[in-house]
C-alpha cells in the first residue's frame, strides 16, 4: 500500500535532531561562520546522542538506519547551519563507499573503531584538474606488491585535516580514464598524508575545506574497496545514494529562510500595515512553500529508493538539482523580503543565501545533475 507517513521512531529521531539543532547549533552558527572554525565539541555531543554514523549497520557500531532517516536528520541540522551540516554530511559521504562495497572484514577493521569514538571521515575525489570530469583524476595508485603507493593532491576536501579516515579515488593509469580508478580507505595517520591550503569560502564557513596531499603513502591492498579498477562504479553508486541527503539539507536551509521571512513579514510594517498583508509578499512566500514541499517529496522518494536497493541515479539527481535551486531562489527571496536588513549580518538570511549557493555546486553541480537526468531520459527512465 502506498504510504507517506513517518513512523513514531522516525519522528522521535527527527525531534531529537531538531532539539539538538535548536539548543546546540543555532546559538553558535553565526559565530562559527564568522570565525570559520568548526565547533568540534558538536561532533562529540552528536555522537553521544546517536546523531552520527546513522547509515552504518548496528553490528559495526552505527545507527543501523537508512538514507531516509539520514535525510530527516540532515534537513534539521542544515536548517540550523549548513556549514555544520556539511561537516557531518562529508563524514557520511566518506563512509558510504564502505557501506556500498566493504567486505565484512573491512567493516570490522574500519567501521568498528571509527564508530566507537566521536570522529569524522572525508571523501577525497576532486583535484585541481578533475572536478565534474571524475575520469581525469591524476592521483596515482602505483601497485607495489601488496601495497598501492599513493601520490597526488586532492582539492576542496570537506573535513580535510580533521578527518580520521579518507576514502580516496585514485588511478592506476590515467590513460585508462574511468576504467583505471580505484577506491582506497586511507587512515589520516599514515605517513605521507598531510593537508595543504584551507579554502576561504563565501558560505558554509564553519566546515573545514582543505587540500589533502598524499606523498608516497603506502596503502595496503586490503584497504581497497571492491575490485581493481572498480572505483568509478563505486563513486557513482556512492553519489547516487548520498545526493538525496544534500537535497534534504537544501530543504532545511530553504525552510529556515522561509520561516524567518514569514516571521519578519508579520512584524515589519510599511504603509501602515504588516508587509505580510501585501499580496506581492504573500505570493513570494507561497512560492517558497510550494518549492519546500515539492523538494521534500523528491528527497523522500530518492532516499526511499536507496533504502530499497533500487537504482536511483535519475531520482536523486532530480531531487538534488530541484532542492538546491529552490534553496537558492528561496534564500534570495528571503533577503528581498527583509529589504535592507536582509543584506546585513543582523539577520540570518544573508547567511542562508551564501550557504545555499554551495548546494548547487558540490556533490555534482546542477549542470551535472542535468547531464544525469538527460541520460536517464534517453536510456533508462522508469517511474517507480
Ligand atoms: C566548499 C566545497 C566543498 C567541497 N567538498 C568536497 C569534498 O568533500 N570532496 C570532494 O571530492 N570534492 C568536494 N568539493 C568539490 C566539488 O564537488 C566540485 O567543486 C564540483 O564537483 C565541481 O567541480 P569544479 O569545481 O572543478 O568545477 P568544474 O567541473 O570545472 O565546472 C565548472 C563549470 O562547468 C560546468 N560543467 C562542467 N562539466 C559540464 C558538463 N558536462 N555539462 C555542462 N556543464 C558542465 C559546471 O557545472 C560548472 O558550472 C567541494 C567543493 C566546495 C566548493
Image (cartoon, rainbow, N blue to C red):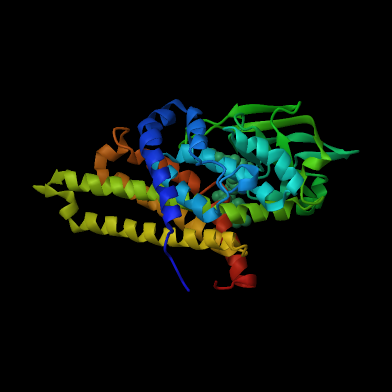
- Going by the picture, which residue comes out furthest to the left? 272
The residue at 32%/58% (across/down) is 289
> Where 104 falls versus 217 (above or below)?
below
> What is the x, y in percent for residue 380?
63, 71
x%, y% of residue 163?
Answer: 62, 33
- Whether residue 39 appears in this view of the structure is no
Q: Position of residue 12 (x, y in %)?
A: 41, 49
Using the rendered view, name the quadrant where residue 60 is placed.
Answer: top right
Relative vertical location of residue 50 with respect to residue 239 in this rendering, above or below = above
Q: Residue at position x 23%, y 54% from top?
A: 281
| Residue under the image location 81 percent in, 42 percent down | 222
Q: In the figure, residue 338 lies in which quadrant? A: top left
Using residue 127 as the reference point, say whether residue 348 is left or right of it.
Answer: left
Q: Nearer the viewer, residue 138 or 109?
A: 109
- Residue in view at x 55 percent, y 56 percent: 367
Whether residue 189 sits left or right of residue 160 in the image: it is right
Q: 352 or 302, which lies in front?
A: 302
**Figure quadrant of the C terminus:** bottom right
Q: Looking at this rendering, what residue extends furthest in the right direction?
A: 145
Q: Position of residue 151 (x, y in %)?
A: 78, 34
Look at the picture and state if 279 lies above or below 206.
below
Residue 239 visible in the current orientation: yes
Tell me if 73 is positioned left or right of 134 in this view. Answer: left
Q: Residue 4 falls in which quadrant of the image?
A: bottom left
Amino acid at each position: 500500500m502506498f504510504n507517506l507517513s513517518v513512523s513514531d521512531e522516525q519522528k522521535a529521531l527527527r525531534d531529537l535532531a531538531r532539539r539538538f539543532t535548536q539548543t546546540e547549533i543555532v546559538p553558535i552558527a553565526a559565530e562559527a561562520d564568522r570565525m570559520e572554525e568548526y565547533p568540534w565539541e558538536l561532533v562529540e555531543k552528536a555522537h553521544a546522542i546517536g546523531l552520527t554514523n546513522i547509515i552504518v549497520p548496528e553490528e559495526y557500531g552505527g545507527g543501523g538506519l537508512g538514507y531516509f532517516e539520514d535525510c530527516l536528520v540532515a534537513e534539521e541540522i542544515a536548517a540550523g547551519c549548513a556549514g555544520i551540516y556539511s561537516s557531518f554530511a562529508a563524514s557520511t559521504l566518506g563512509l558510504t563507499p564502505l557501506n556500498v562495497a566493504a567486505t565484512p572484514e573491512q567493516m570490522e577493521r574500519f567501521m568498528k573503531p571509527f564508530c566507537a569514538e566521536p570522529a569524522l571521515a572525508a571523501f577525497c575525489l576532486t583535484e585541481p584538474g578533475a572536478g565534474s570530469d571524475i575520469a581525469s583524476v591524476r592521483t596515482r595508485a602505483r601497485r607495489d606488491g601488496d601495497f598501492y603507493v599513493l601520490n597526488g593532491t586532492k582539492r576542496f576536501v570537506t573535513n580535510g585535516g580533521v578527518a580520521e579516515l579518507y576514502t580516496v579515488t585514485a588511478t592506476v593509469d590515467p590513460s585508462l580514464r574511468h576504467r583505471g580508478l580505484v577506491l582506497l580507505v586511507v587512515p589520516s595517520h599514515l605517513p605521507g598524508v598531510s593537508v595543504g591550503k584551507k579554502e576561504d569560502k563565501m558560505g558554509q564557513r564553519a566546515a573545514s575545506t582543505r587540500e589533502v596531499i598524499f606523498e608516497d603513502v603506502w596503502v595496503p591492498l586490503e584497504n581497497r574497496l571492491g575490485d581493481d579498477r572498480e572505483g568509478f562504479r563505486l563513486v557513482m553508486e556512492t553519489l547516487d545514494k548520498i545526493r538525496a541527503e544534500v537535497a534534504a539539507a537544501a530543504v532545511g536551509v530553504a525552510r529556515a529562510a522561509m520561516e524567518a521571512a514569514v516571521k519578519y513579514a508579520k512584524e515589519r510594517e510599511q504603509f501602515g500595515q504588516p508587509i505580510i498583508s501585501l499580496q506581492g509578499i504573500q505570493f513570494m512566500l507561497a512560492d517558497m512553500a510550494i518549492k519546500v514541499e515539492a523538494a521534500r517529496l523528491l528527497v523522500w522518494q530518492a532516499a526511499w529508493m536507496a533504502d530499497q536497493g533500487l537504482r536511483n541515479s535519475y531520482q536523486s539527481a532530480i531531487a538534488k538539482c530541484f532542492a538546491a535551486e529552490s534553496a537558492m531562489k528561496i534564500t534570495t527571496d528571503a533577503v528581498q523580503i527583509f529589504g535592507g536588513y536582509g543584506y546585513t549580518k543582523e539577520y540570518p538570511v544573508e547567511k542562508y543565501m551564501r550557504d545555499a549557493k554551495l548546494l548547487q555546486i558540490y556533490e555534482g553541480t546542477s549542470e551535472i545533475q542535468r547531464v544525469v537526468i538527460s541520460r536517464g531520459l534517453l536510456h533508462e527512465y522508469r517511474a517507480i
